[in-house]
Image (cartoon, grey):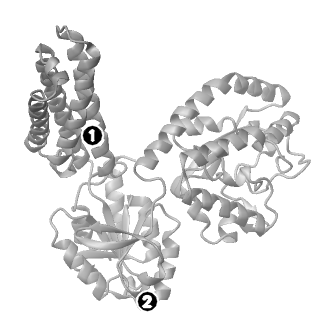
Amino acid sequence: MKRGVLARSRTLDLEHRTGGDSDVAIVDWDAGPPRQGRTVSESVVCRFVAGADIVAILGAGAAAIHLGASTVDWRLEGLVVVLGALLASNYLRLTGAYRFRHFSDLGATIGRALLAWLLTLGTLFVAAFFFEPITATNGPWTALWFALGAALIVASRITLNHQVKNWQRAGRLGELVAIIGSGTMAQRLLRGLNAVSGGPRILGVYDDDAASLRRRCMGHAILGSVDDLVRDVRLYGIDTVIVALPPTAEHQLVETLNKLTVVPVDVRLCPGEFALRLGAVQASHIGGHTFLNVIDRPLRDWKWIVKSFEDRILGGLILALISPIMLAIALLIRLDSPGPALFRQKRYGFNNELIEVLKFRTMYREQSDANGEQLTQRDDPRITRIGAFLRRTSLDELPQFLNVVRGEMSIVGPRPHAVAAKAGPLLYQEAVKHYDSRHRVKPGITGWAQVNGWRGETNTLEQIRKRVEHDLYYIEHWSIALDLRIIARTVVGGFTGHNAF
């Protein structure tokens, strides 16, 4: 959907829920441009810039040593370069060169970075009077080093400033925040947030009593109930939800938090008596106010980046290795029965979005079940001869590495389920409370539930509940080590089993 069409559809939706008050929609979306993509993580950008500076300084030093004429041992010069990089790293932090708010001001960001680089030069110059090894390395190469280092630092700041402006135009800077509650506590909170310059972008207010309330609360539109908010998180990419309900409304607080567990969003709770019952929680500071972190998006910031690298790099390598096997399997399927080699099925992915999962076709084409309404059973007559073998060995799942490389799935994660899959007579969503919580991360080819034996048929409610229980454990305890452990267990014994058919 094009940007203009998407923005218009959002406006129409907000107008519908605010009684056709077009001014409401315009005010809220004019808080910033419609966002195109994920909100930029300031901490990730700052750490990336810090790493890039070290690489630039070391690279400039290596180039200067190679190009500059010197009779000194290059290893001694290299030691000085490493010392300079360490000094520069500390001076860059002391001068505030890694404060995100300065990146949008080209003069300020270049000035702070060059000041740190000059302080590094000055420190090494003073040290040369006291330490003979540093004095011995003085020569033309040092001037070349500092000139190259300054040029790389300035170039990186110009590039960064340009990128920050692109992010600003795309609306990707600053968290998009929604407020739950319209009472005294919420009004006091909104009054404080409105008074903060450069505070978070507030989409609007949500309250389960929205139908009986006025259209606005402290200048912000009341956009609907908490159920509407769950939908809006998926539609508009809301980053943070602040719950500002009175401490006496404990039951409402619990119900609200339960509803928000099914969407990938940070939930922050205004402190109150209810906070005493939450146990150990951390706090966040937004717009000069303190909030309790009661729910965190899984795999945020660096975790999300590491997981993405794991999937794309490892997934690409595995796909390259298994390509001959996949071609052979595809040929066998075509020879065994008429029809395509691949089977495509709509399943729920990240944030409840429908994705098209790829598998090798294991059933006769005319008996394929696109929605998964009838789960496979032992000796299922719909399964072909080669299909039975592929299912027992889980080789039918290999095409899903294409989903991984495309960014729709992960190698490790909760298995994606067909839209009409059932546990006994009930749909999975009906059988397990907060079932959608497993969709807060990308689905995987293998997962914690699968390597622990919870795969195959779900004839009883206990089977799907145990599967979801293991999926949620994985989400809450994710680490690279856990992923590698699951992959190892899958390779050793997870492909086959008495539940694989």
Residue 49 rendering spot, x and y as whole percentages = 27, 39
**Amino acid beneath label 1:** Ala
Sooner in the amino-acid sequence: mark 2 or mark 1: 1
In this rendering, position of residue 57 left or right of residue 239: left
Q: Does residue 472 appear in this view?
A: yes
Q: Is residue 179 above or below residue 339?
A: below
Q: Is residue 148 above or below residue 421?
A: above
Marks 2,1: beta carbons within 8 A:
no
Q: Is residue 384 above or below residue 62?
A: below
Which of the 4 quarters of the picture holds residue 493? top right
Residue position for label 2? 249
Q: What's the residue at 58%, 34% (across, down)?
A: 315
**Amino acid beneath label 2:** Ala
Residue 356 rendering spot, x and y as whole percentages = 60, 45
Q: What's the residue at 64%, 52% (across, down)?
A: 416
Label 2 Cα neighbours within 10 Å, binned few <14 / some 14-19 / many ≥20: few
Label 1 Cα neighbours within 10 Å, binned few <14 / some 14-19 / many ≥20: some
Which of the 4 quarters of the picture holds residue 201? bottom left
Residue 330 rendering spot, x and y as whole percentages = 74, 27
Q: Secondary structure at mark 2?
A: loop
In this rendering, position of residue 4 left or right of residue 336: left
Q: What's the residue at 13%, 42% (across, down)?
A: 109
Nearer to the camera, 278 or 425: 278
Nearer to the camera, 497 or 48: 48
How far, Cα to Cα, is label 2 from label 1? 46 Å
Residue position for label 1? 50
Nearer to the camera, 38 or 308: 308
